[in-house]
Amino acid sequence: MRVHFNNQGNLRNFRSFVESLDFSEPQKLEITTHDKWITVHPANLVLTAALAIKVGRSNSVILGKVPDTGRYLDRMGLYKLTKTKSPFEYREKEPAGRFVPLSVIRTAEDQSRFIADMIPLLHLSEENATIVKYVIGELVRNVLEHAKASEGAIVAAQYYRKTNRVSIGICDTGIGLWKSLQTYWSPKTDAEALNLALTPGVTGTTRREGGSSENAGAGLFFIKSIAKITRNYFAIYSGSAEYTLHKHDKRVSAPRLFADPAQDPHNETGDAPSLNGTLVAVDITLDETPELKQLLTGIGEVYDRAIRERKRVKYHEPRFI
Amino acid sequence: MIEMQQLVGSFAENKDIAKRIRIEQIMPALSKGKEVVIDFDGVSGATQSFIHALISDPIREFRDVAYANLAFKNANDDIRAIISIVYRYMQESLSGEENDQS
């Protein structure tokens, strides 16, 4: 397998990163970089780390000339997952920035510990911390519960001071969305599975409205909606399907939420290199974030509407003769 | 009274704990018609999936008994919003089930 980090590693360009992936020769991983400058979104990083963990340290290598900005790969912990020795050295007291390095979460206890430990690393206010905890809590739990990923969830996050934004990436090499939705929803393709996974009320554990005792099928819809309301990108990639929610136009005062992910401004493909697992990534601009209460209430109303509309489809129609 | 902070810490996201509280405390109390007070003092936030795992089954199983006997104390605005969301969509879902059963 081959992964290349270029100088445009953000969610806006996530599709081009995905298209550049090469999953041939799945027993080894080669990582290359742009030779002068790299920018790496946590999404790209967690995907690469997940692959490195899958094939093992001895089969993963970082090749070629890595520019000075590649120091970031070391800081985030990618070199440790490969057999390549980091060429970067640090002076004591060098500012570490505000990031959460690559972390592996395998259990619910790991998750709680991670969430408690990560907030001081990002130096967020209590209000902003709550929304980041919320997003990570929901996304990691999805992996632990549905992905059947023996290597767990690989998580990383970065705070960007200039844009006052937190970027989060979570990836696993588990069964993927298509397989996890087979029992109750039987999607035919990865793209169909991905669309179902983003639809409010769809869970891999039941077809019953309101969900099962533990799942409502709301998690991904809520996270995508948070990204939309805060005018940010959201990306999800599983199997050969990839979906990126576009950043909402600032000229529109209140982005409207839709239950159907196809109605949101986005690009999607069902023809990406096939990832065995699932990746979810989201940006959250803290300036643009309304109070969580307000955010969730609006999202909850769309969720209710989706249930009502699905139920209406099942209503008996009058028999006119 | 269920004191959540002692069980979940300052942020409620571990659904395994939610499930345990539901099975060991909420469901048995409601089945006897007792009041259950869930105290969120010291808890700054919760995920929707945590709250769903905590109260959706009691609502589905006990309906009016749950609405009358479940009470939430010291829930901040965010947690109140999430509890309200779960209440709304569960009732929305169950009204259909009642129609199907009638």
Image: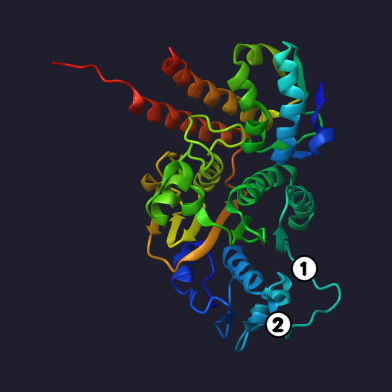
Q: Choose top left, top right, bottom left or bottom right for residue A157.
A: bottom right
Please provide percent x and percent y for residue A212.
Answer: 57, 33
Chain for mark 1?
A
Chain for mark 2?
A
Q: Which residue is mark 2?
A: A83
Vertical position of residue A84 compared to residue A14: above or below: below
Identify which residue is drawn at 71% across, 37% down. Answer: B45
Q: Quadrant of the C terminus of chain A?
A: top left
| Left-right relation of A214 to A303 | right
| Left-right relation of A162 to A311 | right
Q: Say which of A2 and A296 sits in front.
A: A2
Identify which residue is drawn at 47% across, 35% down. Answer: A207
Element class at badge 2: loop
Q: Which residue is mark 1?
A: A96
Identify which residue is drawn at 86% across, 76% down. Answer: A92
Element class at badge 1: loop
